[in-house]
Amino acid sequence: MKKQERHLISIVERMLNSRFVVKFLTNFSKLTSNRNGTILLISIAYMALFIIAPFIGVFGIDLNNKNLSDWVNVAVFFNNAFTPFFLLTTVFLLFATWNTSRREFEETNKQLALQTSVLLYDKVTDVLPTVVKEIDEWLDSPVDSKVMMKARKNVKNLPYYEELTQISKSQDDCVNNTMTNKAVFSGLWHSVSKIRSNPKLFRNNAHQCLYAHAIIADANFVEEACKHYVLLIGLLTSLESDSYSRLLYKTFYSNLNEESQIPYFLEIVSFKAPTVANDKLSLLLNMSPVSGKIKGKDMYFEQALFGM
């Protein structure tokens, strides 16, 4: 091998092992945030060495050669040899660019979602008191006369009717059709098991519990309750941000008065109403002050809700 050729090969080797190349590859890796980029460039660099070195070793390179056709042949050879590697590098760089753009797009979407949640939070907190007031008014209103009439007929078919009737102190409210929608949810809360556990303490709630079980089985009552429920749930679960949703739910529950039946209303109707937003709904119900106090109260509660 000529001295000139050995000199060229040594120059290429020194370039590939130089600090400049290592620094360039390291910075490129940081830029793309993908270690595969460094591996790819190192592979291409050493492949180039394995192509150049044998070529020089076999054919040699005479820098004093003034024959243009020989240099054209050399250029064609290296062009054909390196084109696949350059194409692979181009594909990788395109992928790296796309990946960076995708991450930036996702980050932008997160920022937009956060800004939207901030704006929606203000709007929801403005509208929420009106919706809550409408539900409170419905809860304070008497049960529909047709629903009540049907309940008075069906209540005697409940398997625990005789037992709770004997425990009950008074049934005047139910007989006079003055039972409110709020009393239905209160009656479901005062379960059969709870009344049985302390008949003297809960004797005033026995008939309310009986009629509540009969009323909640009525499709018309459930439909009316679900209308209010879906409106409230749709409003409360409209925020994309979990942090703002939590803040909204905390504000919502803290603004309800201690005697409000809305937490019981939400918890009970959630068993009967169609699901509107699984994740947000679970979060809302888990933050409720009555969370876990209603579900699985007793077998009679499940019979009333699901007709079991």
Image (tube, grey):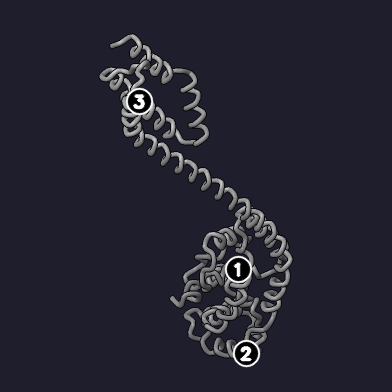
Query: Which residue type carries mark 3?
Result: Leu
Q: What element carries label 3?
A: helix
Q: Position of residue 53 (x, y in %)?
A: 31, 20
Instruction: Name the residue nearer the viewer: 258 or 276.
Output: 276
Name the amino acid, label 1.
Gly
Side of 173 where 41 appears, left or right = left
- Direction left: furthest residue: 58
How packed mark 1 is, by other alpha carbons closer than 10 Å (few <14, some 14-19, many 20 or more), is: some
Q: Nearer the viewer, mark 2 or mark 1?
A: 1
Task: Find the distance from the CA under tag 3 to the CA under tag 1.
Answer: 78 Å
Q: Do the residues labelled 2 and 1 touch (CB within 8 Å)?
A: no
Residue 136 falls in which quadrant of the image?
bottom right
In this image, 129 relative to 168: left or right?
Answer: right
Query: Along the line of sight, which residue is nearer the eye, 19 or 179?
Result: 19
Identify the image quadrant of the C terminus.
bottom left
Return the residue at label 1. 234
Relative to 86, residue 68 above or below: above
Secondary structure found at label 1: helix
Question: According to the image, label 3 marks what residue?
Answer: 68
Is disc 3 surrounded by few (<14), some (14 to 19) or many (20+) residues within 10 Å?
A: few
